[in-house]
Image: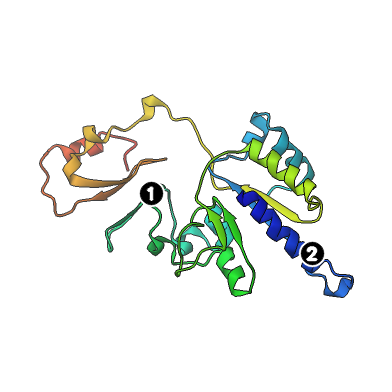
């Protein structure tokens, strides 16, 4: 349903930009698509005909960075799970609706609203959060799917006459890698659980030391030194 809404806005924008006077024509519409966890070499490792079609006709170039123009240290969303020691707030993919985490930068769907445009954001991180008490005109929260959705999108673009008349950007934020069980660090073998707060688990553990917590295991220091991959 939202795909039809997005295409409707694109059609409307293209119609306004495609007047009879070439001097008054604006830039073509832009459709930005991002896949979470889609590593670049997946395009060559797996058969995905719809993405391969786009890949063969386009060019190769972090999700929130793409829509804010800022590096992660500036827009503030550094990982899928975070903890702020000042506010004591927690952030995760299941707990990301607090606008406080997203307030450091303005995404393009809000910038476009300020310019008088209606906007639609489909399953983009942060698109369902009221940033500054505002959201895109239409939005859906994050979900997952890849090649079939690309095929549907291309089919609909052709159907409504937008294929070849807009700029299409397909991107991703990061990839995935296998982890060897022989290289795991078992935290409970190195540190007593009372001595730290666990914030994130992937791809590496993010810990906040409980500096005021008295150590209950006097062997923690020695066990830390015995774990060569623990830094």
Q: Would you say 192 lies left or right of 121 here?
A: left
**How many numbered callouts?**
2
Q: Residue at x 64, y 40 (%)?
A: 149
* Picture disc at residue 83: none
Work out whether mark 2 precedes mark 1 in sequence or the reverse, and give the earlier one: 2
Q: Residue at x 75, y 42 (%)?
A: 155
| Vertical comparison of 115 with 154: above or below | below
**Disc 2 and disc 1: Cα gap in Å?**
40 Å
* Quadrant of image for the C terminus: top left
Q: Would you say 28 lies left or right of 86 here?
A: right
Front residue of 12/125: it is: 12
Q: Quadrant of residue 137?
A: bottom right
Q: Residue at x 28, y 34 (%)?
A: 227
Front residue of 193/228: it is: 193
2 vs 1, front mark: 2
Q: Residues within 10 Å of mark 1 (few under 14, many from 20)?
A: some
Query: Does residue 100 appear anywhere in the picture?
Result: yes
Applied colour scheme: rainbow
Q: Secondary structure at mark 2?
A: helix
* Picture disc at residue 15: 2
Residue 102 on image: x %, y %: 44, 62
Residue holding disc 1: 92
Query: Does residue 69 appear anywhere in the picture?
Result: no
């Amino acid at each position: 349903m939202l795909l039809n809404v997005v295409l409707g806005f694109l059609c409307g924008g293209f119609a306004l930009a495609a007047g009879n006077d070439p001097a008054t024509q604006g830039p073509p519409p832009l459709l930005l698509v991002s896949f979470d966890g889609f590593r670049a070499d997946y395009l060559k490792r797996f058969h995905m005909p719809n993405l391969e079609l786009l890949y063969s006709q386009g060019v190769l170039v972090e999700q929130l960075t793409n829509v804010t123009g800022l590096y992660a240290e500036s827009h503030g969303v550094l990982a899928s799970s975070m903890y702020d020691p000042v506010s004591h707030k927690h952030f995760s993919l299941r707990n990301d609706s607090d606008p406080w985490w997203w307030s450091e930068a303005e995404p393009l769907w809000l910038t476009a609203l300020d310019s008088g445009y209606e906007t639609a954001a489909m399953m983009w991180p942060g698109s369902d959060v009221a940033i500054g008490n505002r959201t895109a005109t239409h939005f859906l929260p994050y979900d997952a799917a890849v090649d079939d959705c690309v095929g549907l999108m291309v089919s609909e673009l052709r159907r409504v006459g937008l294929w070849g008349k807009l700029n299409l950007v397909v991107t991703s934020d990061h990839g995935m890698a296998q982890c060897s069980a022989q290289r795991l660090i078992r935290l409970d073998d190195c540190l007593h659980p009372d001595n730290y707060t666990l914030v994130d688990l992937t791809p590496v553990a993010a810990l906040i030391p409980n500096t005021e917590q008295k150590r209950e295991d006097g062997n923690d220091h020695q066990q830390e030194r015995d774990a060569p991959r623990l830094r």
